[in-house]
Amino acid sequence: MKPASIPAEARMRSLFFLAAVAVICASSSHAITVAKSGGDYPTIAAGLNAANPGDTVFVKAGTYNEFVTWPRSGTSGRPIVLKAFGDGPAKIDGSGLTATQNAAELLIIDTKSYIAVIGMEICSATTASGSIFLKGIQVQGASQHILIKKCKVHDITTTNTTTNAGANAIGVFGTNGSNSITDLLIDSCEVYGNKTGYSEAISIDGNVDGFRVSHCHVHDNNNIGILIAGYYGESPNAATDQARHGVICDNRVERCSSCDNPAYAGDCSADGIYSDGGGKSVFERNIISGCDIGMEAGAELAAAMDDSMIVRDNLIYNCNTGGMFIGGYAANRGWTMHCRVENNTLYMNDAQGTGSGEFLIQKAHDNIIRNNIFYSSAQKQAISNAFNSTYCYNNTIADNLYYSISGGTGIAGVNLDSHATTADPVFAHAGTDFHLTSGSRALDACDPGYAPAQGELDIDGNPRKIGNAVDIGAYEFAGSNVLFAGIARYHRVRHDLPRLCISMHSPNPAQTLVVREQQNILRINGSTVAGTP
């Protein structure tokens, strides 16, 4: 039976920016320059300490070895902005610094609001301590209206292998039980080369309500790429201890693997994108490859529930252990329930031949898996069930397309599908270009009564329905009007974006930056850099 409790997007709160902050538009009243020599201040901390609402702190090229604590909030319409000047890399660098319990974050924003960090490089911090969680950027408390954009965060490293240690490139932790972190946007960042122990490259946990991670390139980290989580006690109020109402979209996640992580002793179990007890969020239009597990909606703690997730229009290929998992991984773990997994393309995952295959259902009930392409390896393992009916029940599997590199017969999981299509999806070039071609059985093959969600787009940014019915898989066939050929590193698609306008005036007129994010278009100095005109 199909679960009746799955919320439509109309029932969800704003997924991108909340209505209360729909407009942030200000001209900087004061420009402050940080430079190794010749600026207003020699350190980033000193520059921020001098900044007031509406000010922009420009950081000229250089390496700044310091821990930075954000001192105060901006106000509605007058954010405080930290911005690379544009004359070369502006680095907050942890080289030579010693992290302590009181100083373990290169940049920390604690219960501050109306903040923008743009174009900075956060890097090169290491700890061997068994009691320190090292962070590149940390947002915590009840911080609100936060923008982290076009930043590079890399080489944040723990060498300790105990469970009390770890590291995050970017950590967002809602630690206030009553007031959530909300209105958070991480966009167009590159996060790479981090060695995080038992932790994740990007981690969003606790009382976080309303966030987006988009257009990021997350690669070559030795554990999970992007995590949303709940039930871990980050919020002191159990009722708010869950990252929720978020969107993880249009990201490229590659080679996030724990195979060589000393803390995991050879266990290859790192997800590209993972919801661990998170909920009521959307994972869409992401491209994931070379990770251990491509994507997962699970619940590791016994009391946890990963609920009402929407996973759609993603491409997952060539992962080590499996393509997509749902459910707690053991009988004494939590549940995944009331989730929708729709219109994804999974190709040649489970390279290690673990038997997980393209899609693994674990401790889960009342979920929908439909309209997906499962193209398996020679082991022909499309869908696997890890548990009996006590722990895995009422999951609807329908209208998926199945194929194997060894042909279309004997594929495990087809028998679970009430309306299976077994045929070669006829990709433009299997392995490198997953667009459908005119001979594909996936074209117009979804149930004619199936309607995509309002505003839903395929992975290219095309309308989700172009022909008589929706196509199976992540790509909608657009004939000769295909927007992108092959696998793009980043996407340029329309979003329901916040109306963000920050004008940052530099002492050097050539460096004046104007960011406008209105009517689904992001422009910097008049040039479109995200969205489509």
Image (cartoon, rainbow, N blue to C red):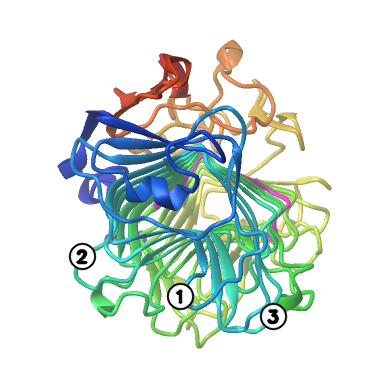
Q: Amino acid at mark 3?
A: Thr
The range drawn in magenta is 282-293
**Residue 102 badge:** 1
Percent across and percent down for residue 355 are 74, 68
- Residue ID at (79%, 67%): 260
Q: Identify residue for label 3.
A: 161
Q: Identify residue for label 2.
A: 179
Real-space Cα distance between discs 3 and 2? 34 Å
- Which SS class for mark 2? loop
Answer above or below: position of 445 versus 144. above
Q: Please, which residue is most extreme toward the front here? A: 38
Real-space Cα distance between discs 1 and 3? 21 Å
Q: Nearer the viewer, residue 447 or 490?
A: 490
Q: Amino acid at mark 1?
A: Asn
Q: Please, which residue is most extreme toward the left here? A: 20
- Residue ID at (57%, 77%): 329
